[in-house]
Image (cartoon, rainbow, N blue to C red):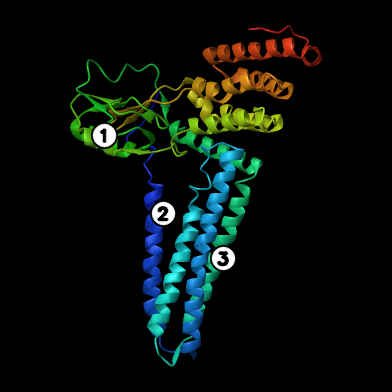
Amino acid sequence: MSVIPGGGPAPLRRSRQARAGAVQLLCALSGVALGLFVPRISGGPDMPARQVADLLLTLGFGVLGTTAVIFSLLFLVVQWAHTSFTPRLTLFRRSPIVWRTFALAIGLAVFCVTAALTIGDGRSVTFAVPVVTAILLLAMLTLLRTLLLRALASIQLAPVLHSIVERGAAALDTLYPSGAAPDASDPPVTEGPPAATVSWPKPTAVLQQIDVKELRKAAREAGAIIVLDKAPGATLHRGAKIADVYGSAVVDATVLGALATGLEPTFEQDPMLAFRLLADIALRALSSSINDPATAVQALDGVEDLLSGSAASRARDAGPLRVAGPDGVVRVVIRRPTWEEFMRTGIDDVIVAALNSPLVLTRLRTLLTDLEPGAHPHGRDLLNRRRAWVEREMADRYPVLWRETSPEPPGRT
């Protein structure tokens, strides 16, 4: 078990969709403001107003075509990821660069049209108008270039696997912070029956993020302890228990308001998603219709990278995450996946699918062997049983390969 002291780091709820909408609105309002202000600047060189207005209108309506390019890229990349990798892969669709480029395109179009209307029938206009237009256009082209490169990377295997592993490692660091002190010897923080139980009252949804700061504040004000029964990434069914509240009751709406939910899991606080995606990519590669064992091996490289990382190492002995208030009293307890759950999610289904692939079986055996030294006794036992399973299949199905790669008898434990 780990404890985050009062005032220490805590995973915070972040609403990416709300931020994307706010950025788009801000760019549109900024375009209006600039379009009204810049043409009224006095002093400096002037240009013929009619030519500048025509240029602005042409550019403004032309830039709107950029939005079609953005959505075309979205359809292309999403469809490609769905058919080539896994339908749960949403990296490009959720990438901030997509919506920032869209927002800047809207802002530039609004600026051009507003500035053209502001110029009206004037005879001349300040040279600042085409300068500002050129700066905004260059900024949009820079973002568009980055977007195109990101889209290209999103349909290639190696960049996708790298991004999944990178985001999975970040989620592990968030849920298993290095500053949390081991607390396995401390007594339980709750005693007796709970004062209240919070259930999920809405249709089925996925728990995406938990606002620990808000929960800690509510629990401290009520003198309570909130014990969450669900970890980020869990599916919430109507009527299912979400949390127990000890000490004194906390309003259900307060607990529910600290939970960010949606239709699909996200990376921010859910490290299990990375293991699921890597396993999905490996399973699809091993299907009879694709039969690409090398891709499965690359996905297993990512699984081993995550399982052997420092954050995953902290998950070996970690129980629920306990978050203390400023007074040092534990106020929030959050269930977290265990290292064994990560291992089962990333490896077990792949073993079953790899029985007809000596290349993948060999990689699985190496992976399980490499992970053993750092595992605690229970985890080591799980690894040994799976390695024995892999070795038995290699010995039975590919005896020549088995004799050449291992002098030891199969099925050891």
Identified at 56% across, 40% down, the residue is: 82
Residue under label 2, please give it: 20
Instruction: Name the amino acid type tagged 1.
Output: Val
In x, y percent, where is residue 30?
A: 39, 69
Mark 1 vs mark 2: which is more N-terminal? 2
Q: Quadrant of residue 201?
A: top left
Q: In which quarter of the image is the N terminus?
A: top left
Q: Marks 1/2: CA distance?
A: 25 Å
Q: Marks 1/3: CA distance?
A: 44 Å
In x, y percent, where is residue 126?
A: 46, 86
Residue under label 1, please give it: 255
Marking on residue 141: 3
Q: In which quarter of the image is the C terminus?
A: top right
Q: Marks 3/2: CA distance?
A: 19 Å
Q: Residues within 10 Å of mark 1 (few under 14, many from 20)?
A: many
In x, y percent, where is residue 68?
A: 51, 60
The answer to whether the residue labelled 3 contacts the one labelled 2, judged by CB atoms less than 8 Å apart, is no
Q: Residues within 10 Å of mark 2 (few under 14, many from 20)?
A: some
Q: From the viewer's perspective, is the residue at label 1 or at label 2 nearer?
A: 2
Q: From the viewer's perspective, is the residue at label 1 or at label 3 nearer?
A: 3
Mark 1 vs mark 3: which is more N-terminal? 3
Secondary structure of the residue carrying tag 2 is helix
Mark 3 vs mark 2: which is more N-terminal? 2
Secondary structure of the residue carrying tag 3 is helix
Q: Is residue 364 left or right of residue 318?
A: right
